[in-house]
Amino acid sequence: MSVRRHWAALGLIAVAVASAAAEFDLQGHRGARGLAPENTMAAFQRALAIGVTTLETDLVVTRDGVLVTTHDLLLNPDLVRGPDGKWLPAKGPPVRTLSFADLQKYDVGRINPASAYAKQFPEQQPTDGQQIPALADVLALGAGNPVRFNLETKITPGSGADTPEPAAFARLVVDLVRAAGMTRRVTVQSFDWRTLVEVKKLAPEIPTACLTIETSSNDTVQRQATGGSPWHAGLRLSAHGGSVPKLVKSAGCGTWSTFWRNLTPELVAEAHAQGLLVLPWTVNEPADMARLIGWGVDGIITDYPDRLRKALAEKGMPLPAGDGTQ
């Protein structure tokens, strides 16, 4: 990078830091996954008590068309106990094959202590008896407070019958968000940008966030794919000079939400130059939070909103309502 470009990037970062100080978006990932059972009412309520600006969650659709907040298309044996109270022996059944009433027979109030997954979240406090919530009930938590919602459509290029088609999925989300009167407080995000394109067609007023990741084991950008990544709704990175922020902009997204390890100060500046917000996920260590805040990101998605509040407080930045500890 030339000296001129370097200083230009630093200048953009400085502007972004000043903006972030006033409007930083503290997002509780799956509610507060590090502290309470993920994507449950207990986790969302915990995040609200701690104090977040946004509740982040995942969306899957039941057989009878109910939007529910769960990360997995198939019931996950690390998280789910059956009606008999026993941990599921294997993945499944698909949520899409169950009615909402059937889904409520499963308990998601704790992580299976025998799983490797449990070791990742030693601070999580179980709340037995939690069920997979309907999105309508989660949105109702916004009554009487200004919290926002970041809703991720769980769909992939190969999810097939386990999800609705992108247009139908988008329609379900838009219709429910409008019925709840939440169009000004919801963002829809996805790795599979097909649903985001459809949301913008149906409801231009609802902001969208383009998710990306580039790792050796998980790569939605797929820079070497000559025909473009199947995750990007027919858009091609090569048509935008290899710039992911420019690709995100072309998809109609106002936010670029990338895996935090893929981010650099230069990319933050590049995204801001495109008029995008930058919202990395999922950042859990205080030192990483502090570094990204210093780079001028516009918010952070974290499993530990209490840690992020502390990182923001240490930089003298405003905090959303909440006591930070509950």
Image (cartoon, rainbow, N blue to C red):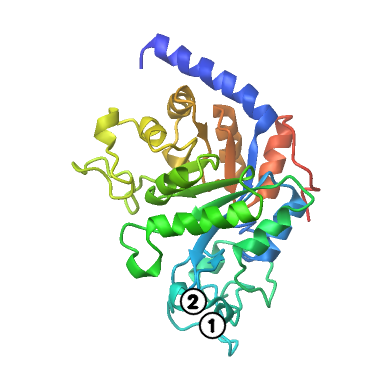
Screen quadrant of the N terminus: top left
Specify few, some or many for label 2: CA neighbours under 10 Å numbering under 14, 14-19, or 20 or more.
some
Question: What amino acid does circle 1 point to?
Answer: Trp
Q: Which residue is mark 2?
A: 77
Give residue 14's quadrant in the image: top right
| Residue drawn where x is 67% and y is 46% of the image | 307
| Image x and y of residue 219, in percent | 33, 49
- Residue at 47% x, 18% y is 9
**Foreground residue among 28 and 246:** 246
Dot 1: element: loop
In the image, residue 29 lies at what x, y percent?
A: 59, 53
The residue to which callout 1 is attached is 87
Residues 59 and 21: in front is: 59
Quarter residue 176 falls in: bottom right
Residue 234 visible in rendering: yes
Question: In the picture shown, does residue 127 fall above or below 184?
Answer: below
Query: Mark 1 and 2 residues: CB-CB less than 8 Å, in contact?
Result: yes
| Residue closest to the eye, 252 or 299 | 252
Amino acid type, label 2? Pro
